[in-house]
Image: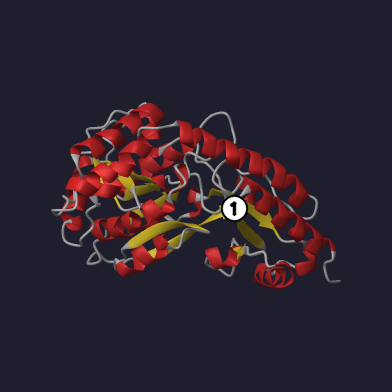
Amino acid sequence: MVKALDTGLAGYPGTAGESPLRQSCANWVKRRYSVKLNPTTQILPVNGTREALFSLAQTVIDPAQPGASVLSPNPFYQIYEGAALLGGAQPYYVASVPERNFAVNWDSVPAEIWAHTQLIFVCSPGNPTGAVMPLEEWRKLFELSDKYGFVIASDECYSEIYFRDEPPLGGLQAAQQLGRNDFKRLIALTSLSKRSNVPGLRSGFVAGDASIIKQFLLYRTYHGSAMSPVVQAASIAAWDDETHVVENRNLYRAKFAQVTPVLAQVMDVKLPDAAFYLWAQVPQAWQGRDDVFARELLQATAVTVLPGSYLARAVNGINPGQGRIRMALVAETAECLEAAHRIADFCRQARP
């Protein structure tokens, strides 16, 4: 970063990013997923997945087409909804259901919705549920994409925080295993925010279908999204190193191992497949009112959790986030453990 300060700030950076950064990203994909990409045509640096998810939708969606739709998991990362609406499409929410370990029930989508779908957001590992998509689910989505022509945006920003021995399957990896080596209509998005615990760096990349990457690059040249050379230099150092990633993952594993048993004494909560959230059911005393539980918990203990109903939308009168809360275990272990004990004590003193 210091070296980049000397020479990198005197001119405008290119939107495509410098070749060493794109190569570093491609090298990481090869190490992590055994997928070989062309760093010039299949990799594009972005300023974190948030802005990339939003701007990708603007690139892909054609609002002039009747009934333009974007599919989103439900509950979901709120950028998906905003990107669809501001792109001129209508969001269609697909529930993540407890009986399927919070996997998205894609089979519930009617054929008439698929016929108008232009983009589908996939989040694996999921936010807020932590669910990981298996290969057969990817196969299903690829076959539907072939039939209806929609683009798959695979949000994989939690891919490096996992609790099982085998790392989560990625979209590009799934495509390759299924013989789809051109990654047609598939874009994977990832970042350093969670992997390297540097959300303030605002650095990530998108990868996949070269034709979409080409369109995306052209779009991005118009809205000032070039990455600072200083950030590029720091990003190369981060993508090239795995030691700090392993250490970060081990810290999360230790944190979850201590916190989950404390909370499991008072509510339905299980260790997720991946990500740094606990997706817990509120105790019966609150009768499924996750918003009331969160508010009273904050007032009584100064512990903040997010009501699950705020992360989802009601479809046919059912909000799949209702009655649950999302707890992010991003603080230090001692602080998270203290918060867990406060929550447990609060639940034991539940009102009648």
Q: Residue at x 37, y 38 (%)?
A: 238
Helix, strand or loop at mark 1: loop
Q: Look at mark 1 in the image and give the residue it sits on.
A: 331
Q: Nearer the viewer, residue 127 or 288?
A: 127
Q: Residue at x 28, y 30 (%)?
A: 181
Q: Categorize mark 1 by other alpha carbons within 10 Å: few (<14), some (14-19), many (20+).
A: few
Q: Nearer the viewer, residue 72 or 325?
A: 325
Quarter of the picture holding the C terminus? bottom right
Residue 347 horizontal side relative to residue 269, left or right: right
Q: Residue at x 62, y 56 (%)?
A: 327
Q: Height in image: 1 above or below 52?
A: above
* Residue 146 shows in the view: no
Q: Height in image: 104 above or below 294?
A: above
Relative image position of residue 120 (x, y in whole percent): 38, 53
Looking at this view, name the residue that lies furthest to the left: 11
Relative image position of residue 111 (x, y in whole percent): 40, 54
Display colour scheme: secondary structure
Relative image position of residue 227 (x, y in whole percent): 25, 52
Relative image position of residue 152 (x, y in whole percent): 35, 48
Identify residue type, mark 1.
Answer: Ala
Q: Nearer the viewer, residue 63 or 299?
A: 299
* Residue 160 shows in the view: yes
Quarter of the picture holding the N terminus? top left
Residue 133 horizontal side relative to residue 351, left or right: left
The number of numbered discs placed on residues in the rendered structure image is 1
Residue 217 horizontal side relative to residue 30, left or right: left
